[in-house]
């Protein structure tokens, strides 16, 4: 049987971090593909390179720096992950979600999770922000649930509720902020696939049929882990490309990274205002 990440392993990393940084974070922020620049706004920052932490999953792809940035954003103590890892990189699900576990052991109560996603909803376009109101966990439905294996009873129950994966209260705030600052934020359902290949046109028509508005290869494992441990979540997709339902255009990783430049200023406004008001 596979050995799973244990609580002592998680706590060992948390202890190492506590020795390095003076600030104890209350909010965790995970930055998706091409969105890493957001971490530059953190004040009094203390940075830990992911390679310094034993067992921390190392990013293998462009657009994910692999840094943990601790500091202050809008008067809140934050811990920002500049870059995440994905299942397709070869890590097991419990390893992919280990950063969320460490956040929980450090005392993080709220997780702001972002990603780059392809628009399935035809009304959504590259550069749009989309508040994630719910998700379809294709990856967990297929057996790759991050909670598979021995339950970490100290953190949460064996069969955790998932009726409200995304905080309604923070969703209301995000809508207010979008209106006030004319961010034009959309909202909808995010579907998580394993990747790394992008979807075929028939995949996309299927995903549209089951109610997905945007598609990506991340976020949902982290959200399931966060909710298991009682962390409240706000999820935001930055739409990087239109999903190719008719097979007439090509989706590339470069396109995904480029759209980040359009998305970052809006996302930064939204995140800073959320921190201010929550
Ligand atoms: N499909 C899957 N993942 C993605 C996409 C996409 O079109 N864009 C960004 N991440």
Image (spheres, grey):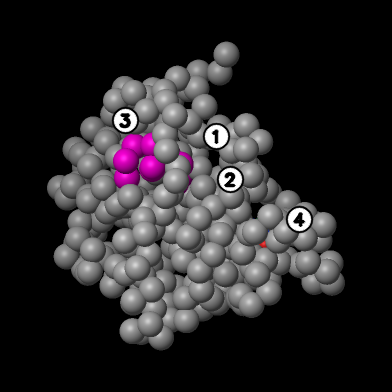
Nearest to N terminus: mark 2 or mark 1: 2
Q: Report x, y in % for residue 158.
A: 42, 26
Residue 145 numbered tag: 1
Query: How far apart are labels 3 and 1 at the CA level?
Result: 16 Å
Residue at mark 3: 155
| Mark 1 vs mark 4: in front | 4
Residue at image coords 26%, 47% = 109
Mark 1 neighbour class, 10 Å CA radius: few under 14, some 14 to 19, many 20 or more: some
Q: Looking at the image, do the residues carrying marks 2 and 1 touch, with CB atoms under 8 Å apart?
A: yes
Q: Does the image show residue 64?
A: no
The quarter in which the C terminus is drawn is: bottom left
From the image, tell me which residue sits under label 2: 137
Q: Secondary structure at mark 1?
A: loop
Q: Is residue 79 magenta?
A: no
- Determine whether 97 is above or below 71 in the image: above
**Is residue 138 depicted above or below 36 in this figure?**
above
Quarter of the rendered image showing ligand 1: bottom right
Establish if 186 lies above or below 109. below
User: Label 2 neighbourhood size at 10 Å, few (<14), some (14-19), many (20+)?
Assistant: some
Marks 4 and 3 in Cβ contact (< 8 Å): no
| Magenta highlight range | 222-231
Q: Kindly identify the residue that appears in the image at 48 percent across and 61 percent down.
A: 132
Q: Nearer the viewer, residue 71 or 192?
A: 192
Q: Quadrant of the N terminus?
A: top right
Q: Position of residue 188 (x, y in %)?
A: 54, 64
Residue 271 in percent (x, y) is at: 34, 68
Alpha-carbon span between mark 2 and mark 1: 9 Å
Q: Residue, x 32% and y 30% (percent of image)?
A: 155
| Inter-mark Cα distance, 2 to 4 | 14 Å
């Amino acid at each position: 049987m596979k050995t799973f990440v244990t609580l002592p392993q998680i706590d060992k990393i948390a202890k190492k971090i506590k020795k390095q940084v003076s600030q104890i974070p209350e909010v965790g922020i995970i930055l998706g593909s091409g969105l890493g620049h957001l971490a530059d706004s953190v004040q009094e920052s203390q940075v830990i390179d992911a390679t310094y932490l034993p067992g921390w999953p190392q990013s293998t792809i462009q657009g994910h720096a692999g840094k943990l940035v601790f500091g202050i954003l809008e008067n809140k103590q934050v811990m920002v992950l500049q870059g995440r890892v994905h299942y397709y990189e070869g890590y097991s699900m419990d390893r992919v979600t280990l950063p969320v576990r460490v956040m929980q052991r450090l005392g993080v109560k709220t997780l702001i999770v972002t990603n780059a996603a392809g628009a399935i909803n035809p009304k959504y376009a590259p550069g749009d922000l989309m508040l994630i109101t719910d998700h379809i966990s294709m990856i967990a439905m297929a057996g790759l649930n991050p909670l598979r294996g021995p339950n970490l009873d100290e953190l949460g129950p064996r069969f955790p509720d998932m009726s409200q994966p995304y905080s309604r209260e923070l969703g209301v705030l995000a809508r207010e902020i979008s209106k006030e600052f004319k961010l034009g934020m959309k909202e909808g359902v995010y579907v998580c696939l394993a990747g790394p290949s992008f979807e075929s046109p028939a995949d996309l028509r299927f995903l549209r049929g089951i109610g997905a508005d945007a598609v990506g290869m991340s976020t949902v494992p982290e959200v399931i882990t966060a909710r298991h441990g009682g962390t409240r979540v706000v999820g935001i997709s930055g739409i990087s490309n239109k999903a190719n339902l008719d097979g007439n255009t090509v989706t590339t990783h470069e396109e995904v990274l480029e759209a980040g430049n359009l998305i970052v200023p809006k996302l930064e406004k939204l995140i800073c205002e959320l921190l201010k008001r929550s």
